[in-house]
Amino acid sequence: MSIEQRVNDIKEDLDFFEDELQKYEYIIDLGKKLDSLDDEYKVPAHIVHGCTSQVWLVCEQKDGKLYFKGTSDAVIVKGLVYIILKIFSDSTIEELKDTDMDIVYELNLSEVITPNRQSGIIGMIKKIKEYAIKA
Amino acid sequence: MFKKDFPYFNNSEIVYLDNAATTQKPEAVINSQTEYYEKYCANTHRSNFGDANKATQKFEDARKTLKNFINANINEEIIFTKGVTESINFIASSYAKNFKTVIISSLEHHSNIVPWHMQGRSLGNGLEVVKVNDNLDFNFAHFKELLKENPNAFVSVTHISNAFGKIHDIKIITELAHKYGAVVMIDGAQSLAHMKVDMQELDVDFFAISSHKTFGPTGVGAIYIKEKYLKNVEAYQTGGATIHEVDFNSSTLLDSPYKFEAGTQNIAGIIGFAEALNFISHVGYENIEAIEKNVYNYLDEELRKIPNIIFYNNIEDSVGSRSFNFENIVHDDIGILVDKMGIALRVGHHCAQPIMKQLDIRGTIRVSISFYNDYKDVDKLIVALKRALSMLED
C-alpha cells in the first residue's frame, strides 16, 4: 500500500469523529496499540527534537525497506507516533525519499494539535526523511 | 464579578487560568491605547506641536503613575523597557557585569538565569544558587553562607515564582543582603498583579516590572533603579532620544531616565500600562487579595480531592499559581485534553527548567488565577481534569 493510500485510510478514520474529544479517545486507543520500545533504544540519538513530550524513533533497514519503531512518554503523543509509524514504516527507501512529507497535513492534525506539538510531528517526519536519505 | 470589565470574557467562553503567563486586559486599558492611535498619535520628547506635547505628557504621566504606584522616590527612578526580560538583561549587562559573584535562587525562571550564563558565569564560577528547602522554601541559612563567602555580591531573585507561585520574603532577603554589602535586584514579573509592592518598605535596589502580567499591554515593562545607583548604571543601548550633544567625534548623554530609553518607546503600551495601574488602584489590592485567597484556597481544596495528585509546595506563602502533577500521567496529555474542553492552563516547565530538573520532573500542570476568576471556573476545571484523567487511565 502506498504512503498516500495509508494517509487516506487514517484520514478517513479520523474524519469519522465529529467530536474532538472522541477523536482524542481514538488517538489514545491507537497509542495503547503501539508496541513497547525497549529501554536500550531510549537513548539521545533516537530522541526526536521539537517535541514537548519525549519521543524516540528508531529505524531498521531490511530488503530495501525501512521499518520504524517508536514511542513517547505521553499517551496522546504515543497515538500520534502510532499514526506516523503506520504511514511510513514498511516503505521502500525510494518511496520515502520521493514522498512530499507535507502529505500528513492532509490528516488535519493541525486542527487537533497545537503549534508547539505540531513541531514534534514535523520533527518525527524530518527524522524519517533523514533516515531515508542516509539509508 | 470583575469579568465584565474585561472584553475578553465577553467574547470568549474559555475558562482562562493561565494568568501567570499573561493576564487579560480591562476595557479601559484597551481604550486608552486606541485613543492614543486615533486621537493624538505622535512621537514623544521630540516635536513641539500639540499632539506631540500631549503624547509626551501622557507618557510622562505614566511614569509618574508607576512611580507613585510602587512608591519610588523620584520619576527618574522609573525606566520603561520592553518587559522584565529586558529589564534584567539591561541591569545584568550595564551594571551587574562588574560584580564578581551573582547570587540567584533555585526558583528563577530563564530570564534570570540565561543572562548570567551569557556573561560566562556558571554554578560556582561567578554564579551561586540559593538552595530550596522542602516545600520550595528559600533557604536563608544557605543564603547567609553564600553572602558571607561572597561579600559585595549582586543578588538577583524572583519575588514570586513563575512556576509555583511561591513568594520570597523580599524584605528579609534584602535586609540580609545589604548587611553583607550586596546589591539586590528583584524580578517582580508576577508581583504587581497580586500584591502591593512598596520600594521604600522593601528597600530593594532594582525591581523589574511587567505590564502584560499586570493587566497592561504586552511589550512593556519597567525597571526601578534606586536613585543612588542611577549614576553608576551605564546606558544599555543608545541612539535617538538619549543624547544631550552629538558631533562626529563624541556624544554626551542625557540624565536618567532618558539616557536609558533609546529610540521610540511603545508609547501606546506605556499609556495603557498606566491605565492598568489605575484600574488596580480602583479595584484595590485588599479586594484583589481577598478574592484571590478565596479562589486559591478553593482551588487547592478541590484539587486535593482528586486521587494521585502531587504537589510540590503548600499554599502557605504562595499566590496565584498552583502547580502539580498526577502519578503516572504526563502533564502534556492533560494540557491537550483540557484545552479541548475549554480550559486554558499551562503545562510544561514554565521557563524554569533548573528547578524542574532538581525536582526530577519534566514539568507540571500549572493553574494560575487572577481576581476575575471565580469558583465556577474552578468547578469547570475540576470536571475537565477528571474527564481527562478518566480518558488517560489504562
Image (tube, coloured by chain):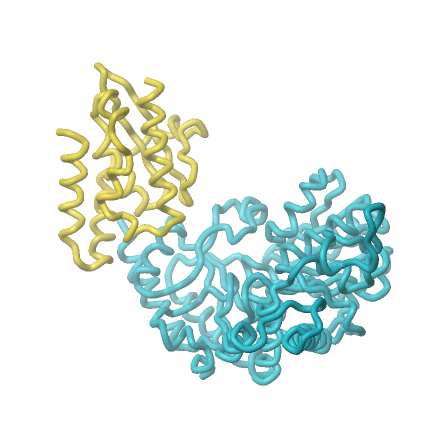
Side (left or right) of B128 relative to B388: right
Q: Is residue B40 above or below residue A74?
A: below
Side (left or right) of B157 relative to B268: right
Q: Please tell me which residue is depicted at 25% across the width and 33% down the height of the picture.
A: A85
Q: From this viewpoint, which residue is outermost toward the front?
A: B49
Q: Position of residue B341 (x, y in %)?
A: 30, 63
Q: Quadrant of residue A89?
A: top left
Can residue B293 be seen here?
A: no
Q: Quadrant of residue A1?
A: top left
Q: Please tell me which residue is depicted at 52% across the width and 45% down the height of the picture.
A: B360
Side (left or right) of B222 relative to A79: right
Name the colour assigned to chain B in the rendering: cyan
Q: Quadrant of the N terminus of chain B?
A: bottom left
Q: Please tell me which residue is depicted at 16% across the width and 51% down the height of the picture.
A: A15
Q: Position of residue B286 (x, y in %)?
A: 60, 83
Name the colour assigned to chain A in the rendering: yellow
Q: Please tell me which residue is depicted at 28% across the width and 28% down the height of the picture.
A: A68
Side (left or right) of B2 relative to A111: right
Q: Position of residue B366 (x, y in %)?
A: 47, 60
Q: Nearer the viewer, residue B252 or A121?
A: B252
Q: Position of residue A75 (x, y in %)?
A: 31, 46
Q: Nearer the viewer, residue B237 or B8?
A: B237
Q: Nearer the viewer, residue B245 or B316?
A: B245
